[in-house]
Image (spheres, rainbow, N blue to C red):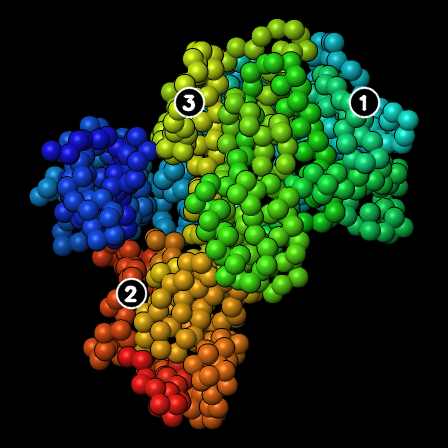
Amino acid sequence: MLAEFEGTISGHRDGHGFVLRDDGEADIYLPPNEMRAVLHKDRVKARIVRYDRKSRPEGRVTEIIERSSNPIIGRLLHESGVWLVAPEDKRYGQDVLIPKGATGTAKTGQVVVVELTEPPALFGQPVGRVKEVLGEIDDPGMEIEIAVRKYGVPHEFSDDALALARSLPDAVRPADKKYRVDLTDVALVTIDGEDARDFDDAVYCEPAKVGRGKGWRLLVAIADVSHYVETGSAIDIDAYDRATSVYFPRRVIPMLPEKLSNGLCSLNPNVERLCMVCDMLVNAKGAIHAYQFYPAVMFSHARLTYTEVAAVLANTRGPEAAQRKALVPHLLNLHDVYQALLKERGERGAVDFETTETQIVCDEVGRIEKIVPRTRNSAHRLIEEAMLAANVCSADFISQNKYTGLFRVHEGPTPEKKEVLRNYLKAMGIGMSISEDPSPGEFQQIALATKDRPDAQQIHSMLLRSMQQAIYTPMNSGHFGLAYESYTHFTSPIRRYPDLLVHRVIKAILGKTKYQLPALPTPGEAHAKLSKRLASKAREPAQKPKKVTADQLAWQAAGLHCSANERRADEASRDVEAWLKCKYMREHLGEEFGGVITAATGFGIFVTLDAMYVEGLVHITELGGEYFRFDEARQELRGERTGIRYAIGTRVRVQVSRVDLDGRKIDFRLVREGEELLSRAMKDKAGGHALDLSPEERAVPRNGSDKRNGKGNGKGSGKRTAQRTDGSGGHGHGTDRAPKSPIQALKAAVKKSVGSAGRKQGKKPRR
């Protein structure tokens, strides 16, 4: 009999599921019949019963250890006299029955939070009661209300934390300034986005003699949150639980109560604030010659925006510069030290990919007005380099003094990811690759060599994807992407708990005391998931494990907790953005757009629209009546008959065919392939000469609808390809489709011409 193992159920929208093993081994597939008595996030014991033809393990649940206590969010429905809730998260796989008297004040169609009263059984659905009514599905901000509950994001402060916040002063008191350096006469300024509400950091720069040469004195002043948030206090416990602020379009769920995040700790202009300062001397080559940390009191001389500072730097005689005349020399000094730091970054070999981030612009009621790219200007980069310098000094200060703290660690790519990247670079004909033990500089050289290619964005995305995610840990092993031997986060204690811990450790070093972590709450589900993933990668045979102290274990737990909740915040933010984009695209059903292929998989291609920066799937069954093979090395789909290729970076034209709001999915239908695609396919199949198609042939409708009419011929019918279900749970709520229109079938004409060309050359057409 095969051994049993423990793990957590991870449901799938198609009805099956997986057991995520605690020991970090490969996840176990569970068929739909095994999922009847369990739900997503349940803790179970299971064993492997067989392996499929691809050697993937399939399992059976032998025992349910613990039912998930997480509430289920969904829409209340009334069907055939029965009340039920269709879970918004399709991984739950089953509707929840609601007894007649357990609906509370909820009405049909409303979004509700359900608490289970009876778990599912082999022959019975789960039963629950309505615990909370969130409102109508189209209410402004509903997507955020769903996300914070779906991902377990703490969004209400405890009564104790709020009471403690109210007891804090409204301004800096004379007693608070004791033992602090007075920097109120230094022209420190904050530089942030137009929509920023909390200001963590302020900067100032002046020329200085460094050693025997010229250089700069760079001051980075960071809000002194640790002065007001005492270790183990009610606010501290809530802040640790959250670990980070969560940013949504039009709303922020802060790590700290608003009195602190937007008031007492925020470096608002024209008021005194307490801060921790990293005071650095930077030489002409951009190297940090010396630094010191000290607590201070400051007075922000201006609240500047990135746009405003970039305009001043671009034109010191422009209107923006005229309005900030007294600050222009200081901004030019900041730009000079930035140029030196940037030069040192290049020599260090740090990775710097240019990727496109988007910003969703909403109206007053939360509807998307437009989706625009976030452009990084010189002011963004200036602040980024200043913050990196302060973070590096913080890590060095902790290491040199041999104190325990949290480092921001980013390890190099895994062997598997290195191999995938090498194959991709070779297949794309880039002419460069990475070594067995690559340095960040190798990645940066490839990025620079390909920056002018049409597919540069996609190549840089592949380089980025080949790297691991950074984590917080007390065990320093450097930051691969930034090419630092030691790195931490010091500059954002208002919104990141690790930064707050780093401040406390630095203060302990300055005061020659030892910082002791408080008794922190038990880590949650996000911590458990990340811990499992890291454990699976950390096995190193033939190494004798070192004895770990209780203090080190506490710091490891804090690092895992903060890392996991950072990911939780990212997932919740992405979920809300996906929801908003789906709502936006519902208004464009049936419309056609140009786009570029940003990913290729075995079940289709993902296309990002040019004008809207929205990604959707063109399913493989929409690519036409032939069999497509996925080339992992080239990251492309290739038709067996026509040779037509759908590769990352290829331009296509698509129609918005379907939007599934519940599943956060957008489907496209291919309308017209790019000329380069067809031309290449024709040349390949006709011995290097493009097939000559008349305008009439080019206008022939594609026979891609055969599979829907039952006339498919096996390969063309798409039966051998992966399928994707709509995930609407059988209710169809939130799913919209465009009316089916005739699809141009250029490939049908290509196929016909290829066949005749093959016969002329004495070859049998491939079947």
Q: Residue 380 lies in what quarter of the image?
A: top right
Identify the residue at horizontal 80%, vertical 39% (top origin): 340
| Residue 370 shows in this picture | no
- Label 1 or label 2, whichever lies nearer to me, is 2
Tell me: 433 left or right of 67.
Answer: right
For disc 1, the marked residue is 184
Placement of 217 over or under 640, stated as above or below: above
The three-letter code of the residue at mark 3 reads: Gln
Q: CA distance from mark 3 to mark 1?
A: 54 Å
Of residues 368 and 746, the one drawn nearer to the viewer in this rendering: 746
In the structure shown, which secondary structural element does the residue marked by tag 3 occupy? loop
The three-letter code of the residue at mark 1 reads: Thr
Identify the residue at horizontal 8%, vertical 43% (top origin): 123
Are discs 3 and 1 less than 8 Å apart at CB?
Answer: no
Q: Earlier in the sequence, mark 3 or mark 1?
A: 1
Rendered location of residue 281, percent (x, y):
81, 26
Q: Crowding near pointer 1: few (<14 within 10 Å), some, many (20+)?
A: some
The three-letter code of the residue at mark 2 reads: Thr
Q: Earlier in the sequence, mark 1 or mark 2?
A: 1
Q: Earlier in the sequence, mark 3 or mark 2?
A: 3
Identify the residue at horizontal 14%, vertical 47% (top origin): 33
Rendered location of residue 301, percent (x, y):
80, 31
- Label 3 or label 2, whichever lies nearer to me, is 3
Placement of 386 over or under 83, stated as above or below: above
Q: CA distance from mark 3 to mark 2?
A: 45 Å
Q: Which residue is outermost to the top?
A: 513
Q: CA distance from mark 1 to mark 2?
A: 67 Å
For disc 3, the marked residue is 543
For disc 2, the marked residue is 721
